Image: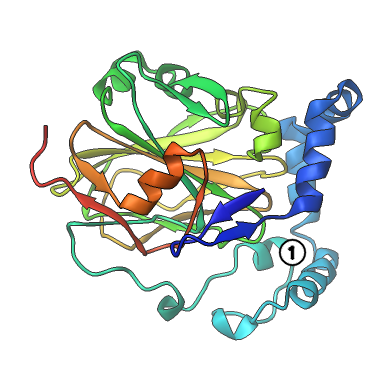
Amino acid sequence: MKYRDRSGHEVTGNEKQDRLLRLLYGTLAGRLLLKPLVQPAFSRMVGHLLNTKGSAMAAKAVVRKRRIALSDYKETDFPSYNSFFHRELLPQKRPIAPGKEVLISPCDGKLLCYPVAQDSCFVIKHSRYSLQSLLQNQPMAQRFEGGTLLVFRLTVDDYHRYCYIADGKKTPNVHIPGVFHSVNPAAVNSLPVYKENTREYSLLETSEFGTVLMMEVGALLVGKIHNHHEAANVCRGMEKGYFEFGGSSVLLCFEKGRIAMDADILHNSREQVETLVRLGERIGAAASMPA
């Protein structure tokens, strides 16, 4: 797969991983093999293995292969692969863009934005979804009609911690259980991934952006979504939570007329091309006046 960075340059993704997922999701034999692998019980088992001391050897191999600069992180010695996977960066490595009216990315990832149609449906890589099926809550889905949906797709090489985009009052978490499909486009083309995956959401009441829907979606081999807070007053840039091993996604949904996305992200999204973004960087701003 190819993405674009903020300078407009195309970046090639993990082609070997993409080919494997196309084989698994695009063939009958692959889908039969996947059936037990996407169940929560299997994910829990893998999660347990990745928390063992023996799994730390795999972390060392990844550091060597990807030439990861451990000096960028708070810890450099990891007791397990999972502790390496959700390692925490030094704060200066992900500075928060100044200005409360500035909309920041909540995470590292590949971003697409969508207008939420009147019938609350949207398209991700040629597959159609509704906010109602995503949330399993029709009144809440209707609240965001005419607004904007942001989908941040994280892959294994991304930083797997995410933050709040604004000061505000957060509601309790709503957990929706499911199975753990990949969020790679190869999977999204074959299955309604965002309907089936385990996910968790809450609302954030803000002065700058109105009411914001925040959702985390677990993916293949992700055993847990770790959110730090239930109902709470939170601050812009404060860590909201992290994912354990695997790809995953963060979704934000805004009410009508509340945000203005940056032009490059809008342009790329219209072409169905993802934009590479980093936690804390500017991706848009609060609209001058709500519609």
Q: Quadrant of the C terminus?
A: top left
Q: Is residue 252 above or below residue 81?
A: above
Is residue 178 in view from this perspective?
A: yes
Q: Residue at x 42, y 76 (%)?
A: 91
Q: How many marks?
A: 1
Q: Viewed as shown, does residue 250 lie left or right of 144?
A: right
Residue 164: horizontal and vertical position, in percent? 34, 54
Which residue is label 1 attached to?
81
Front residue (pair 46, 290): 290
Q: Viewed as shown, does residue 153 lie left or right of 104?
A: right
Residue 289: horizontal and vertical position, in percent? 8, 41
Q: Residue at x 21, y 31 (%)?
A: 256
Front residue (pair 266, 124): 266
Front residue (pair 190, 52): 190
Q: Secondary structure at mark 1?
A: helix
Q: Residue at x 56, y 79 (%)?
A: 73
